[in-house]
Image: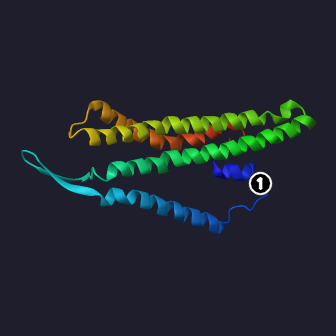
Amino acid sequence: SYDRLTAIVFPKKSKLTFRGVWTLIACTWIIGFLLALPLTIYRNYKERPWKNYLETFCAENTSFLPPYWHVLIGALVWFPLTVMIFCYSMIFLKLDRYERRVMQREHPIAVSYRKKVARSLFIVLVVFILLRVPFTTLVFIRYNRFVNENTSQIGKDFVILWYVSHYLIFLNAAVNPLIYGLTNDNFR
């Protein structure tokens, strides 16, 4: 959304340089690494004896990781959503001003592109929200189970929500190019 904001709202400002691109890539990887680091550090070694096998695994530290998941949700869902809403709002304002100026000089058909852009951006936002809400819900349900219950049993509904929410998060990245391809003639 930020690249579209700079292309539409600030077209004459300086473009992103090659060095800037590499800086952004490095920052993205470093931030991703730092966000994932607590998942590797705050684990407890567990053993589960079976009849003929000793299962060993690392379980989440239930005192630290539940609050961490809220931070992670903020970083992965709410921060990007806030940035998208801000950027798309700025784009809508710019397009609205441009449309008013053009409407005074040209025929209304000449500015019909605004509706297409608005529709495309609206679909991107709605899809982002719909595909990420199940994961956010999963985190809150999981946190409440850690806080309110001392059980190691999980229901079938929770397992289904776990798989569906994880697949939907990944699906979001795959669906965005399809949305742009189907809603934007220039993109095709």
**In the image, is 150 to the left or to the right of 132?**
left
Residue 53 appears at what percent x and percent y? 10, 49
Residue 54 appears at what percent x and percent y? 11, 51
Residue at the spot 76% in from the left edge and 59% down from the top edge = 13
Can residue 83 be seen by looking at this rendering? yes
**In the image, is 116 to the left or to the right of 101?**
left
Q: What kind of residue is marked 1? A: Pro
Looking at the image, is 149 positioned above or below residue 3? Answer: above
Can residue 187 be seen by looking at this rendering? no
Residue 61 appears at what percent x and percent y? 27, 53
Residue at the spot 70% in from the left edge and 36% down from the top edge = 118
Q: Nearer the viewer, residue 99 or 177?
A: 99
Q: How many marks?
A: 1
Secondary element at tag 1:
loop
Q: Residue furthest right?
A: 105
Mark 1: few, some, or many residues within 10 Å (few <14, many ≥20)? few
**In the image, is 158 to the left or to the right of 115?**
left
Q: Nearer the viewer, residue 103 or 66?
A: 66
| Image colouring | rainbow
Q: Residue furthest front?
A: 148
**Which quarter of the rendering shows the C terminus?**
top right
Residue at the spot 45% in from the left edge and 38% down from the top edge = 168
Q: Residue furthest bottom?
A: 19
**What residue is shown with label 1?**
11
Residue 43 appears at what percent x and percent y? 27, 56
Residue at the spot 64% in from the left edge and 46% down from the top edge = 86
